């Protein structure tokens, strides 16, 4: 979450008048994340999240995201569907951006998840993968493996201004991952961004899975690999928590199943996840507007993870 587009109280009041949610009490921009503009909105009838879609989120993809959230909510997944206005339309416009009012979920995102919390979150991912088994929608992964080398070239040697040798290091990572990527593996709709800050918890209970705006159709196991790379390290990508890493695999296996053949693929998929996030973080680092209320993410936190997987990956997933 982030704020790129600023919304006045007057504009927000007019926007909310189309909903049965009461009158505006307060609104606060949320700086975390990098993709959309988000506000925590309190009204006389409750609390909501207002999201204005920009940057990588295409307006044409929004019906897919809304349908996915409705599908998951109907099957008991703890996800926040959009709230339709009085005319039944969920996707509206505010400040020149597509916008939705979204149900607020209780719970907190974790900075330092425990093994038991990781187990529960991976169980929730497995349940999500089961729930999308009969979802008819599809969406190409615009940040999938085929996009990584073109994005590297778009960033170019400017990456070396972030850290000397960053461009060459990511190029070598791609050289190792691309030939080993199993594009014919089992595919489904995946979350594709299930970081700890996209899982809400109360203790060891998962109360919310949020921010589905990278959701797409891709290798199902890639979703678990992304989660493993995000949850199993400290924020800087320096320290690997073996207990959390193992709990993620065990929780997913308990909920969905994890065959030996699946485990053999995860090392390459996790390395790919590191390249993807190092590249997009690098791009954002170089191109984030100076006046945006947004917390930039360190791409080097993912090059450190990549180096760890390159050295230890096969052992971690055996």
Image (spheres, grey):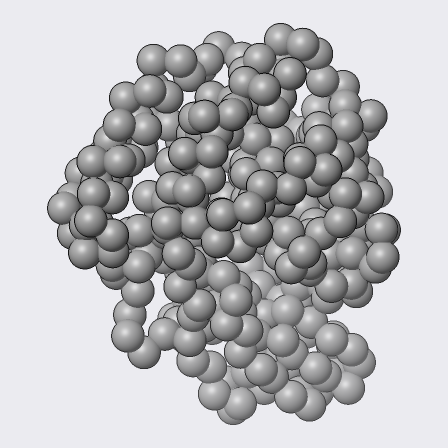
Establish if 271 lies above or below 265: below
Which residue lies at the image location 70% right of the left edge and 40% below the top edge? Answer: 244
Establish if 30 lies above or below 285: below
Can residue 212 be seen in this snapshot?
no
Which residue lies at the image location 78% right of the left edge and 78% below the top edge? Answer: 46
Name the side, left or right, on which 294 lies relative to 191.
left
> Of all residues shown, which one is farthest toward the left?
157
Total labels: the figure holds: 0
Q: Nearer the viewer, residue 230 or 128?
A: 230
Which residue lies at the image location 25% right of the left edge and 44% below the top edge? Answer: 166
User: x%, y% of residue 115?
Assistant: 77, 43
Which residue lies at the image location 70% right of the left edge and 24% below the top edge? Answer: 133
Can residue 25 be seen in this snapshot?
yes
Name the side, left or right, on which 87 lies relative to 99.
right
Name the side, left or right, on which 198 lies relative to 179.
right
Name the side, left or right, on which 93 lies relative to 132.
left
Quarter of the image that includes the C terminus? top right
Q: Nearer the viewer, residue 147 or 216?
A: 147
User: x%, y% of residue 29?
Assistant: 53, 78
Q: Please identify the quarter of the rendering in which residue 106 is found.
A: bottom right
Q: Nearer the viewer, residue 96 or 130?
A: 130
Q: Nearer the viewer, residue 212 or 277?
A: 277
Establish if 97 lies above or below 277: below
Q: Please identify the quarter of the rendering in which residue 249 is found.
A: top right
User: x%, y% of residue 229?
Assistant: 55, 38
């Amino acid at each position: 979450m982030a704020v790129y587009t600023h919304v006045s109280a007057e504009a927000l009041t007019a926007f909310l008048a189309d909903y049965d949610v009461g009158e505006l009490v307060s609104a606060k921009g949320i700086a975390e994340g990098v993709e959309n503009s988000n506000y925590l909105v309190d009204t006389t009838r409750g609390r909501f999240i207002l999201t204005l879609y920009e940057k990588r989120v295409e307006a044409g993809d929004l019906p897919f995201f809304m349908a996915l959230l409705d599908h998951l909510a109907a099957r008991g997944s703890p996800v926040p569907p959009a709230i339709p206005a009085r005319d039944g339309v969920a996707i509206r416009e505010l400040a020149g951006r597509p916008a939705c009012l979204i149900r607020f979920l209780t719970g907190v995102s974790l900075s330092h998840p425990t093994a038991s919390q990781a187990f529960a979150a991976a169980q929730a991912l497995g349940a999500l993968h089961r729930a999308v088994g009969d979802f008819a929608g599809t969406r190409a992964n615009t940040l999938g493996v085929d996009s990584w080398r073109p994005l590297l070239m778009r960033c170019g040697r400017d990456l070396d201004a972030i850290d000397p040798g960053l461009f060459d290091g990511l190029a070598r990572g791609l050289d190792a991952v691309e030939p080993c990527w199993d594009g014919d593996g089992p595919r489904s709709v995946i979350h594709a961004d299930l970081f700890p800050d996209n899982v809400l918890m109360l203790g060891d209970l998962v109360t919310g899975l949020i921010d589905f705006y990278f959701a797409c159709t891709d290798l199902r196991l890639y979703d678990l690999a992304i989660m493993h790379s995000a949850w199993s390290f400290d924020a800087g990508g320096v320290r690997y928590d073996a207990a959390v890493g193992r709990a993620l695999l065990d929780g997913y296996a308990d909920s969905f199943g994890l065959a030996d053949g699946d485990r053999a693929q995860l090392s390459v998929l996790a390395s790919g996840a590191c390249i993807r996030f190092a590249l997009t973080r690098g791009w954002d680092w170089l191109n984030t507007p100076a006046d945006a209320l947004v917390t930039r993410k360190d791409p080097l936190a993912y090059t450190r993870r990549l180096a760890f997987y390159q050295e230890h990956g096969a052992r971690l997933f055996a």
